[in-house]
Amino acid sequence: MKIAFYSTKPYDRIYFEPMSSDYDVDIHFFEVPCNKETVMLAAGYDALCIFVNDYLNEAMLEQLSQMGIKAVLLRCAGFNNVDIKAAARLNIPVLRVPSYSPEAVAEFAAALLLTVNRHTHRAFTRTRDFNMNINGFMGTDLHGKTAGVIGTGRIGQAMIRILKGFGMDIIAYDPYPVSGLDVEYTSIENVFKKSDVITLHCPLTPETKHIVEAKTIELMKDGVYLINTSRGDLIRTDDLIEGLLHKKFAGVGLDVYDEEGGVFYEDRSNDIIDDENLARLSTFPNVLITSHMGFFTKEAVHAIAKVTLENADAVQKGIELKNAVQPPSDD
Ligand code: NAD
């Protein structure tokens, strides 16, 4: 199976190249992202493999269908970037890596929380400059505080385990509560109202787009911490900035951003930043932005490579596609 890999970085090659010899696959690594200009590069391949900031809309999937593409392989868990309904209509299976290391993302979410709370990112630069002043770095004990977890799937549950270790009380919202989970499920409004820390672990869907916006920010406690390691579009950035300007948040940790495509994963240090929201967010001392790297551990990247190649193998052998993304049931 000839596979066109888009948006590849050196670390993709390190894991995929040696492992690919165990499978009957021939991988070509493209560095360019997958978009309407580059989709033609997949001509002559059997499948394409894309990442979080690549996208496939209906027109592109039509093109891929005409090229004879047999499968779309996502080397990630989220699938909001592919028109799943169109892919199903065109009989192109879309396979993902549903779970590679929920702990990797949850541990990173906890790292963001600890960092914005205790200002270690700023302490690092101060002490490197031999400025040992601690003014402005006062944090708050997490022990005994309430954490609100939105989405109690694999990553949400891993985060709950970590937060419990800190001695936090956990409340949660999920339209599909997990039975036997030792948390207090409540309405999403209550999560917004009662939490000292809010951490987002739900997928991006039409229902979850902008769940954090002016009205829900208004519900939150003053001095709340907000952590988003899921998808940027869960937050309406204009409203987040407004909330920050009104000092609503003690700290905000963002591993994802609604306009991250084309910026995250790239070195743009020599460019003029033309994204005013990203530039504005970067000016708040209590906001920490990272470049969608919650997944980035050795264990997770190894698992992503293994499951992606197993998914390709299943397509090739015509066996059950257990990681195929199903189109929404109401369609
Ligand atoms: P999962 O499918 O195991 O869990 C998602 C949970 O969200 C489910 O329990 C589901 O019922 C719940 N949910 C669905 N709709 C909801 C709603 N309207 N409100 C609240 N909860 C809702 O997924 P996961 O593996 O835990 O991953 C969660 C998300 O994390 C992914 O969708 C992806 O966007 C993101 N992610 C980010 C990174 C990263 O590197 N930052 C890595 C992997 C995944």
Image (tube, helix red, strand yellow):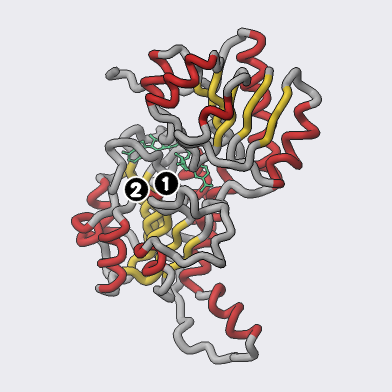
* Local crowd size for mark 2, using a 10 Å CA cut-off: few (<14), some (14–19), many (≥20): many
What residue is shown at x 49% (from left), y 42% (from top)? Answer: 53
Residue 237 vs residue 78: left or right? left
Q: Would you say residue 164 is visible in this rendering?
A: no
* Nearer to us in this view, 95 or 7: 7
Tell me the residue that label 2 is attached to.
234
Callout 2, which amino acid?
Answer: Leu
Task: Report the residue at 38% width, 20% height from top.
Answer: 86
Disc 1 within 8 angstroms of ligand 1 (CB): yes
Badge 1 amino acid: Arg
The quarter of the image that holds ligand 1 is top left
Q: Is the Cβ of the residue at disc 2 closer than 8 Å to that at disc 1?
A: yes
Q: Can you see residue 329?
A: yes
- The quadrant the N terminus occupies is top right
The one nearer the camera, 141 or 230, is 230
- Dot 1 lies on which element? loop
Compared across the picture, whether 132 is left or right of 305 comes to left
Q: Secondary structure at mark 2?
A: helix
Report how far apart the C-alphas of labels 2 and 1 lie in the structure. 6 Å
Residue 192 point in image, percent of width and height:
27, 55
| Image side of residue 292 versus residue 240, left or right | right
- Image: 255 above or below 14: below
List x then y, in percent, for residue 232: 40, 50
Give the number of the disc on residue 231: 1
Quarter the C terminus occupies: top left
